[in-house]
Image (cartoon, grey):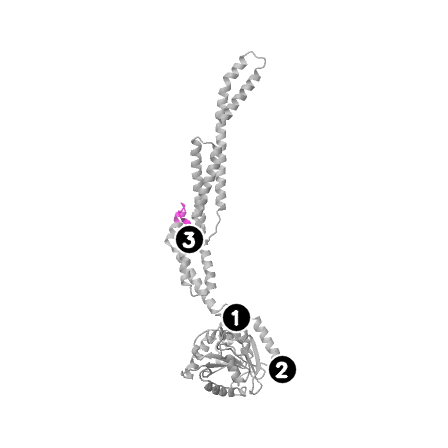
Amino acid sequence: MILMRRLLTAFGCFYILTGKSTLLNKLFGTNFKESDAFPRRSTTTEGIWLARCIGIQPFTLVMDLEGTDGLDHGEEEPVLLKQIATFAVAVSDIVLLNVWCCDLGRENATNNNILRTVLQAMMQRLFDPRSTTLMFVIRDKTRTPLGNLESIIHKDIQRIWDSIPKSRDLHSTSIYELFTVEVVALSSYDYKEEDFNKEVDDLRDRFVNSIEPGRLAGRRKALAAASEFPSAAVQIWNEIKGYKGFDLPSYKVLNSTVRCHDIADSKYDSFQKNEEWRGIQEIAQSHPVPNFGKKLSTIIKTCLTEYDAETTYFDEAVRMRIRKQLEEKLLKLVQPTHRSILGRIGCDALERFKESFDAALNGGKKLALVAPLYSKDFMKQFDGACADAAIDNANWGTSVVRDSLQCGINLYVETVGVGKVSELKTVYEIKLKAALAEPVKGLLLEDRADPWLAIRKLLKTETRAAADGF
């Protein structure tokens, strides 16, 4: 919640289920909508609401803002809420931070993340520090001395301030030079309503004439004259909306990214040193590896399972994204070996085809029948061996090696066929010559009017006989 003097504001910057708007209404006589404790508790205040304080002099506006840790928001603060919080601190004289006593020291419940965001925005010169008063209102106080509670809050503020990179001119500056910090504690509104109302009355008195020296906003520097406040506020809001720093990943995402990358790198290194993988690599240089795909898939799966176990509690989107990167990196590492394996499978298939094909021809089988049958059979064997070498999720094609093997088979069949034809041609030419020599000689010696007619008829008969034998 934030309070501002005159045309400045007070707002409920940090939403804690119930109580922020209730406190503003009790404290300043406003009529902001309050959450009901009995139905589902969810965000009541949405956006920015402005009202005039009743009974507070000088003229003061109070601004109630959408809370930053309601159930509807989940774990990450939306960019809009970061913008709203930064805007409120930039234009306010007094900022009320509604904090439950039981939540002190807890990062998210006390809105330390949002406070860090606001201070980082200030470092980016989105607004100038004006000695704004940060008033932490501790709700449902316990018997713990107020001094102890103040100590926790001051330690948190200092820790946040120390963790923020600063410009040179602010490097040695204390946060208390830029902000005034106040801490008050209130009793439970539900269980000690009478005490709560009395404490609120006492607190209200502190806001009267709060801009006087020594009062709550006595150190503040004016944002603008009352007549200039609307245009000044619009300008600040536009600058805040244009700032891209609010889109940066949250601490959880950044931490998850760093840790998941570290774990992924560790698993990648372990994979490279894996003895089974190194053994497969060595064998693959000279021979095909039986069950190559199954073995590699198991090693990769084990690596990814170990990664999953060590990253279980990190941001889901981050861990899955880096897991995908790790898997791709592992597949890229083993791909050259996979290519080598496919090459070996193709070479072995071609050599075995040649041996079987030659043996079939030497056994008397006809080339025209053997070639298509053996080609189909060995291509099928190649496909089976490639399937055995396939690695899960790799989706690497075998078309290049397969086409090369098919071309090799076709070329060998063609070469053998040409050789066989040449060889058979020579054989049958000799047979044909032997078959024609004596009959032709006899026909020429006979006293015939046209011996060539008989010779041509004989040649045709013997040629047909030779062709049938071929």
Left or right for 424, reference 7 = left
Q: Label for residue 227?
A: 2
Q: Amino acid at mark 1?
A: Pro
Q: Which residue is mark 3?
A: 297
For disc 1, the neighbor class at 10 Å (few under 14, some 14 to 19, many from 20) is few
Whether residue 128 is visible to the viewer of this picture, yes or no, is: no
Q: In 3D space, how far apart are the residues under numbered discs 1 and 2 (Cα atoms)?
A: 32 Å
Q: In 3D space, how far apart are the residues under numbered discs 3 and 1 (Cα atoms)?
A: 41 Å
Mark 3 or mark 2, earlier in chain: 2
Q: Amino acid at mark 2?
A: Ser
The image shows residue 79 at horizontal and vertical percentages of 53, 70
Q: Main secondary structure of the magenta part?
A: helix
For disc 3, the neighbor class at 10 Å (few under 14, some 14 to 19, many from 20) is some
For disc 2, the neighbor class at 10 Å (few under 14, some 14 to 19, many from 20) is few
Q: Label for residue 104?
A: none
Mark 1 or mark 2, earlier in chain: 1
The image shows residue 295 at horizontal and vertical percentages of 40, 51
Q: Which residue is mark 1?
A: 78
The image shows residue 316 at horizontal and vertical percentages of 46, 64
Mark 3 or mark 1, earlier in chain: 1
> Per the image, is 283 magenta?
yes
Secondary structure, mark 3, is helix
Q: Residue at x 42, y 50 (%)?
A: 293
Q: Amino acid at mark 3?
A: Ser
